[in-house]
Amino acid sequence: MISHLLRRLRGRSERLAPLPVPPAASEAADGPAATGAPIVDAAALERGFVAWAFGMEAADPGHDAAAEAIAHAQAVAKRFDARRMPRLPALVPQLLAAMRRDETDADDLATLIARDPPLAGDVIRVAGSAYYSRGVPPAGLPQAVRVLGDAGLRHVVLGSVMRPILRGDAGPARLSTAARLWSQSEARTWLCGRLAGADCDAGEAQLAGIVAGTGLAALSRMLPPGLLAGAAAEPDFAARLLDIARPLTIRACSHWQLPTPVLEALEPGAQTPLARVLTAADRLAMGYRLVEAGWLPANAWWPTGLAMPDSAAGRAALFEALAREVEPLDAEAVPA
């Protein structure tokens, strides 16, 4: 939890900056002052998530692990060649385009999906899960497509296709980090679809959600795990690492020739409707996984404007739905 992160940093010359209290929050009857709930902000979520994802360790006081890790990351970023990234299967844009056409039916989508047997297996497996069908297997691929619906189908397809690309061939020392980063990507993708509404295309939102962590995943595979674990204890490490990772994500997605709205939403500081959805989903997914892992109290106070929805009840309902739709942390992601 965030308090755990603070304790690990106690005694160091640098500490996490105090989390800002939103105006008049202390006067609210259910505000943090009244409930004793810790306050989170965007920087705190990033610090907590990076520390958890990389298995934060107490750093050697005589070794500036963060500076060394950032120097390594900058060197890796200079050498990063998006052309060496795995190719994005042609099925993804074809399927997303087909789902936008009103005349496309479940049989048409099933025909496309059937070209990829492992993907077809995933679609049938999820459609037959307790959440969608109370454990009753669908009669075939077309029925599985109907059971999942558009948002559910996009989530399964993007997850099945991108999981091996984002998790890569993680060695034993990186298994936990790969699993944790993937868990946030999966949650972010589902949240993007749910939050898209009428302001942006839900398919593009989910696509942006699944690829947004590409740069960070690439860095995690190319930097020494022990160095990252030590650096994660430093207060400013998360922000600096994410600043290096974001351009790598954009380079990879440009190489994959993703739609312009997706590329625009990935730009730092972007304010398009899709960018706002992506930002909210990213923060919510970090918070969700940190709560699940025990790194953030479930009653943490989210200031207004940090992530839609603003209400605690709205977030709780969203997290409950998310828990039904996405996989819980797997055994590889759980060890501290």
Image: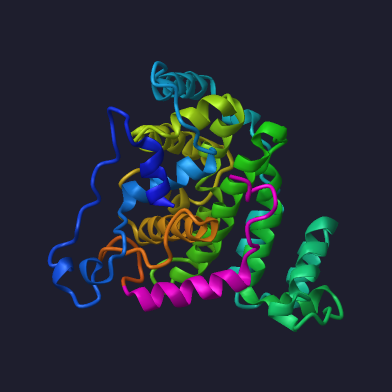
Residue 98: name its quadrant: bottom right
Tell me, yes or no, whether the highlighted magenta stretch contains residue 319: yes
The answer, for residue 270, to whether it is visible in the render is no
Q: How many marks?
A: 0
- The residue at the point 75 percent across, 72 percent down is 108
Q: Is residue 259 left or right of 151 when viewed as pictured? A: left
Q: Is residue 43 left or right of 130 when viewed as pictured? A: left
The answer, for residue 73, to whether it is visible in the render is yes
Q: Position of residue 200 (x, y in %)?
A: 42, 66
- The residue stretch that appears in magenta: 311-336
- The residue at the point 32 percent across, 75 percent down is 311
Nearest the viewer among 110 and 51 is: 51
* Image height of 15 relative to 38, above or below: above
Residue 104: name its quadrant: bottom right
Q: Position of residue 199 (x, y in %)?
A: 38, 69
Q: Position of residue 194 (x, y in %)?
A: 49, 71
Nearest the viewer among 329 and 259 is: 329
